Amino acid sequence: MNHAITFPAALAPGRQQMDEISQVLEEVLGTKIDVTEFNRPVKDGVGSVVYWWRTASADIIRGKVAFQYVQLQMVFKPVVGRMQIDFLCLPEGQKRQGKGKRVLDTIIGIGRRLGYSRIDIEAIEGSFAFWKAVGFRQLDVNRTSFPQPMFYDL
């Protein structure tokens, strides 16, 4: 018996969507961006496609050695119709200039065009205000600890 997970074709991201995100990141960060795809199952058995957008330069750094040059990590979950942003990283000197919002607007547009219903994130304390300002809502408004689960309805 074949237990392969099949994705609704309309929800599966393609090269065009990955290139669109890469292009906006390159424009925002002013450096070349490469995208890498990782296919992996998640704990609940729903297949996910994970993408990392990375720079080849040490000039832009996330701060953790394992993800040193990764500027954006996203998980597409076509089976459940959700996208997840694991992180979006801009250098400290490039924050508060509308660049993160520009990248996010591109991601939201792609999600809507592909037919996704929601984007999920877990905001850390330092990014909570940004996510709230761009329209993400807390999953549990009574929760005060971080990371803070948040979502954006598409």
Image (spheres, rainbow, N blue to C red):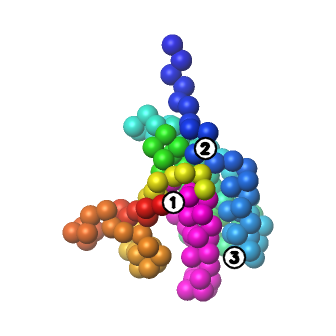
**Pointer 2 with pointer 1, Cβ within 8 A:** no
Mark 2 nearby-residue class (10 Å; few <14, some 14–19, many ≥20): few
Question: Which element type, helix, strand or loop, lies under badge 2?
Answer: helix
Rendered view: 50 above or below 130:
above
Position of residue 97 relative to residue 64, above or below, is below
Q: Residue at x 38, y 64 (%)?
A: 150
Of the two numbered discs 3 and 2 on the same chain, state the one appearing first in sequence.
2
Of labels 2 and 1, earlier in sequence is 2
Q: Position of residue 70 (x, y in %)?
A: 63, 62
Is 129 drawn above or below residue 12 in the view shown?
Answer: below
What kind of residue is marked 1?
A: Ile
**Camera-side mark, 2 or 1:** 2
Q: Specify whether 58 is left or right of 119.
A: right
> Whole-percent x and y of residue 148?
34, 66
Is residue 105 highlighted in magenta?
A: yes
Q: Pick whichever, 127 or 110, lies toward us.
A: 110
Q: Residue at x 36, y 62 (%)?
A: 149
Residue matched to label 1 = 85
The Cα atoms of the two marked residues, 2 and 1, are separated by 20 Å
Amino acid on which the number 3 mark rests in the picture:
Val
Q: Nearer the viewer, residue 65 or 135?
A: 135
Res 28 label: 3
Q: Residue furthest left?
A: 142
Identify the secondary structure beneath mark 1.
Answer: strand
As shown in the figure, which amino acid type bears the numbered disc 2?
Answer: Ala
The residue wearing badge 2 is 10
Which range of residues does the magenta coloring cover? 83-112
| Residue 102 in sight | yes
